[in-house]
Amino acid sequence: MYLWEKLRKDLEKVVGLEIKDSDFGDFTAKSFNKKPKTILKKVKLPVWVTSEIKGSYINFHINWSKMGQKIIDEVQKKDYGKQKQGKNILLEYSSPNIAKPMHVGHLRNTILGISFVKIFEFLGNKVRKVNWYGDTGTQFGKLILAYKLWGNEFELLKNPTKEMMRVYVKFHQESKKNESLEDNAREVYKGLEEGNKEFTKLWKKFTKLSLKEFKRIYKILNAEFDNYDGESKYSDMGKDIIEKLKKKKLAKKGEDGAWIVNFDNLSTTIIQKKDGTTLYLTRDVATAIDRKKEYGFDRMIYVVGPEQILHFKQLFKTLELLGLKWAKECYHVYYGYVSLPEGKMSTREGKVIFAEDVINESLERAKKINKKVAKEVGLSALNYSILKVEPKRDIIFNWDEMLRLKGNTGPYLQYSAVRAKHIFEKAKISDFKWPEIEEEEKKLLRKMAQFPQIVENAGDQFKPNLIANYAHELAEIFNSFYEKIPVLKEVHKDKRNFRLVLVKSVHNILEKAMFLLNIQVPEKM
Ligand code: ARG
């Protein structure tokens, strides 16, 4: 346990109240029943703390000359904040659909996923990263047919997603005029399921080309996966699952011949169509079971949009009905919608905002601000603007705001980290005796001491925004400290050295926080 936590716990034991971090003292406690005075009379506070009563609150102030050295020793450590949670986590994220462009929802998903990986690993877990891309469904019948009718190989190779979208859109226009097209597409899909050579070849080609496009985006964002699994891989396994459900009498035959599962408090769902084919849910059940077998995770986390809340409830419930105890170790982490301020950026087709356009826009705008580090700044603005918001809340991008050097932004963190480094880098730091310290310095120490708990909460609650906002506050305290208090110019040797160590520690923590938010620290800014 980290020192700050230990101090808090110790205080809780002594005082018998819940103790929280405070901006007025170092810790604070609210007393509900008894008068603070009565409480304090009965307890013997440890020597490292003094108390002060404010209404029904007790504020606690650290005795820094007793505790400060220990705290600063800790925050300086290379691996400060790391833990050994030791869980085996399977994290599925991004998971876009073949033949379609990644949209801004996938972008938020991917950026969240990258941060989760880093946070979980930092906390000492093993993370298996999986991309479960959508490569099955009747739309592939339409796509294959459309491509056979109107496709252009040259265009496909040059700009795969665009060409696939073009023929797909054309299919929908044409099928309004010509009804037989829909039937033909169904035939093609059936053929694909049954292994028709020509169709399979095309489908594989589409998959390969799409994955290549996704990977181009992942490379820019710094997303990594241990496994790329197509949803179609689990069609056959899905059929076994259906048999199991039938045998256990969990599935019933509906009037039209489809098989359905009844849940107590969730809406009923179909698990097998009347023509015998599997559905999305069935494939997901099969996938979960297969993953458990393959990797034996302690915990499985799906980062998927909010449209699928019911789907995941049904999925976890089905696993539970099948008697799988680990079902309660499965989590659906969803996130809010992302939109752009009207008129600020046109979208190419209707309402969908493409991930790549958003990335490019951010990079372009960053170029205008700082050519040399445009890539780092553009990406940090993008990552931060997504991660600073609690995942469940919606986001409206504001380009000017997110690229601002001073504000609650990624570039502000970069600027602060570079500034801190610049200060301590040139100085020679030597040992010091604990000096008299200023209010600004206490604020910094207190904030730095909270870092491990913040990361732990961010991991346990799936909230990178806790780290983002923490880093922002730390940067603000640091900048105001530096504006008020001399560091390099301080003549008192102990004070100077102490302050240099403070600055170095701020840098250490900012760098870690930024790493967890997938933000690079540029050399200069
Ligand atoms: N491909 C789907 C989509 O883009 C998301 C898949 C989510 N993962 C899952 N295991 N169901 O909507």
Image: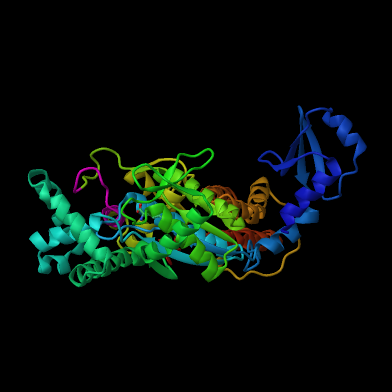
Q: Is residue 345 above or below residue 508?
A: above
Image quadrant containing the C terminus: bottom left
Name which quarter of the figure residue 280 lies in.
bottom left
Residue ID at (61%, 51%): 457
Observer able to see residue 35: yes
Q: Position of residue 513 (x, y in %)?
A: 54, 58
Which is more toward the observer, 171 or 251?
251
Q: Is residue 262 above or below residue 159?
A: above
Assess whether residue 207 is covered by the magenta stretch: no
Residue 204 located left or right of residue 55: left
Q: Position of residue 392 (x, y in %)?
A: 47, 43
Residue 116 located left or right of residue 222: right
Q: Is residue 398 above or below residue 328?
A: above
Residue ID at (51%, 56%): 247
- Chief SS of the magenta region: helix
Please give the range of residues in magenta: 348-366
Assess whether residue 362 is covered by the magenta stretch: yes
Image mark count: 0
Which is more toward the observer, 164 or 461?
164
Residue 511 located left or right of residue 219: right
Image quadrant containing the N terminus: bottom right
